[in-house]
């Protein structure tokens, strides 16, 4: 029988072996832990390592059972100039649209839906002016499934055309006077063929796709459009009533009968536009219709400056200049007059700001504690807000940013003043850097 002393030695040895094995298991192998390698496959590991080199540290569980989505042809088809102008109260001038288009081009947006030229002379002139810019981005224009609309698109010099023909039973009954499925398919084939005869890049846009309950009819319509000359199939959640599961199912089903690529246009009525677009890409869609700041009819559509970094972080797609996305959002906010909330994902004022003293301390010791991507990725800078929840580390950081070297004692006194202002004087806004500088000067002079 072992003595107590020997039992203690065995206990110590077992603990040592356990912790050694634990440390070996969690040790980094390259830039990926052995723990992560247990549930992340080889392709997922490659992407995780690539992202880590960029300073991006997302949840590794995103890449469990990771399947590589081919994003070689990944396209953002920005519709700010068409869908965005359907936002109540938003009217862009021609010069406004030119400014937005130039910025979209700077970001690297491949296709811009420039407007609806048959709607007015101003719309037509605007698209002609956009054509004259000779942007790298291709320009498409919206058209109803009418020859006169298609003629105007061809006349303004756009590269492509979005031919819209509503497909759901609600639209066929109430908009098109009980149009039968047979008549719909005949009209669809005629109008797609007519648009194709102009040499345009033709996108068949089946408005209200997600509420057409006859799946066989839906697939047949898309196939007929392809056979008539359509270059891309647009699947549309017009009322924003679909779920990610529903969109993924539709994209897979429609894609199963097509050889042409699929685009999705998702409205945000249920707050699911981004999730639906992401699910669609995972299911095989290669193009996402978007607008800057999500502008559009009712609740708007998928946000340009959100889907781009999301697809970069989840799939490694990198065809865009992401550092320009925040300034793009600000430009459209200024021009449209539609104010964005400070907590707006990825480009909002508060997204790279830290208010809690616990968070401030953590992020200043090491940014990875409370930032999984560097603010510069989105063209932003880290911000430290000083209020009643802040701490002395935040005070010292702000002082350093102001070019001041202060002691911890001074920082503590500044923090006491700050907390007093909130708890006893009823202050309700964070301190500006200039106010912090004034407090520092007062304390150091006293």
Image: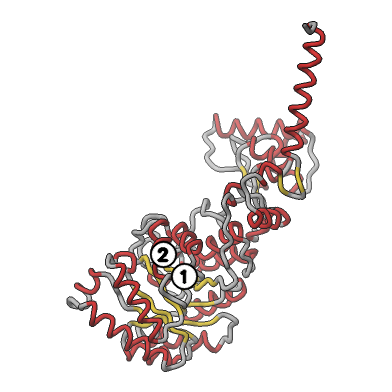
Q: What element carries label 1?
A: strand
Is 354 drawn above or below residue 202 in the view shown? above
> Quadrant of residue 326 in the image?
bottom right
Percent position of residue 321, x then y: 64, 68
- Any part of residue 138 in sight: yes
Depth check: 13 or 159 in front? 13
Is 177 drawn above or below residue 321 in the view shown? below
Depth check: 165 or 325 in front? 165
Percent position of residue 91, x then y: 41, 73
> Quadrant of residue 405 in the image?
top right
Residue at far front of view: 1
Q: How crowded is mark 2: few (under 14 residues within 10 Å), some or many (20 or more)?
A: many
254 left or right of 169?
right
Residue name at image x 58 percent, y 68 percent: 71
Percent position of residue 54, x then y: 71, 57
Alpha carbon distance from label 2 to label 1: 7 Å
- Disc 2, disc 1: CB below 8 Å? yes
Residue at far left of view: 178
Q: Counting residues from the N terminus, which is met first, the one under dot 2 or under dot 1?
A: 2
Residue name at image x 52 percent, y 84 percent: 130
Q: Residues within 10 Å of mark 1 (few under 14, many from 20)?
A: many
Q: Mark 2 points at which residue?
A: 266
Q: Is mark 2 on a helix, strand or loop?
A: strand
Q: For the N terminus, which image quadrant? A: top right
Depth check: 419 or 152 in front? 152
Residue name at image x 74 percent, y 43 percent: 399
Q: For the C terminus, which image quadrant? A: top right
Q: Name the residue under label 1.
A: 289
């Amino acid at each position: 029988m072992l003595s107590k002393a020997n039992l203690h030695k065995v206990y110590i040895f077992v603990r040592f072996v356990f912790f050694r094995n634990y440390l070996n298991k969690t040790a980094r192998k390259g830039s990926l832990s052995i723990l992560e390698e247990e549930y992340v496959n080889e392709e997922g590991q490659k992407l995780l390592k690539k992202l880590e080199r960029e300073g991006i540290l997302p949840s590794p569980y995103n890449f469990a059972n990771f399947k590589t989505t081919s994003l070689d042809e990944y396209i953002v088809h920005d519709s700010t100039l068409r869908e965005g102008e359907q936002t109540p109260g938003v009217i862009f001038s021609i010069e406004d649209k030119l400014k937005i288009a130039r910025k979209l081009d700077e970001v690297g947006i491949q296709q811009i839906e420039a407007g609806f030229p048959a709607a007015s002379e101003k719309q037509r002139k605007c698209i002609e002016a956009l054509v004259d810019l000779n942007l790298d981005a291709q320009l498409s224009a919206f058209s109803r499934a009418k020859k006169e609309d298609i003629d105007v698109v061809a006349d303004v010099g756009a590269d492509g055309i979005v031919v819209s023909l509503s497909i759901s039973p609600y639209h066929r009954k109430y908009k098109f006077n009980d149009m039968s499925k047979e008549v719909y398919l005949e009209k669809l084939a005629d109008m797609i063929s007519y648009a194709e005869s102009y040499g345009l890049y033709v996108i068949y846009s089946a408005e209200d796709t997600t509420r057409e309950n006859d799946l066989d009819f839906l697939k047949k319509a898309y196939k007929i459009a392809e056979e008539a000359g359509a270059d891309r199939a647009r699947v549309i959640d017009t009322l924003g009533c679909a779920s990610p599961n529903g969109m993924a199912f539709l994209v897979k089903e429609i894609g199963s009968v097509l050889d042409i690529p699929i685009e999705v246009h998702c409205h945000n009525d249920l707050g699911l536009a981004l999730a639906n677009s992401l699910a669609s890409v995972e299911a095989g869609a290669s193009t996402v219709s978007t607008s800057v700041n999500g502008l559009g009819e009712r609740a708007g559509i998928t946000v340009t400056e959100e889907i781009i970094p999301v697809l970069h972080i989840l799939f490694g797609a990198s065809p865009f200049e992401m550092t320009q996305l925040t300034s793009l959002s600000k430009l459209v906010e200024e021009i449209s007059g539609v104010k964005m909330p400070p907590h707006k994902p990825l480009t909002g004022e508060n997204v790279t700001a830290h208010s809690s003293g616990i968070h401030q301390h953590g992020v200043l010791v090491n940014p990875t504690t409370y930032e999984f991507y560097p603010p510069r990725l989105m063209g932003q800078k880290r911000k430290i807000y000083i209020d009643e929840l802040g701490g002395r580390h935040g005070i010292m950081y702000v002082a350093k940013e102001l070019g001041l070297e202060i002691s911890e004692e001074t920082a503590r006194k500044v923090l006491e003043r700050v907390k007093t202002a909130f708890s006893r004087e009823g202050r309700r806004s964070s301190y500006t850097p200039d106010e912090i500088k004034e407090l520092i000067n007062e304390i150091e002079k006293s």
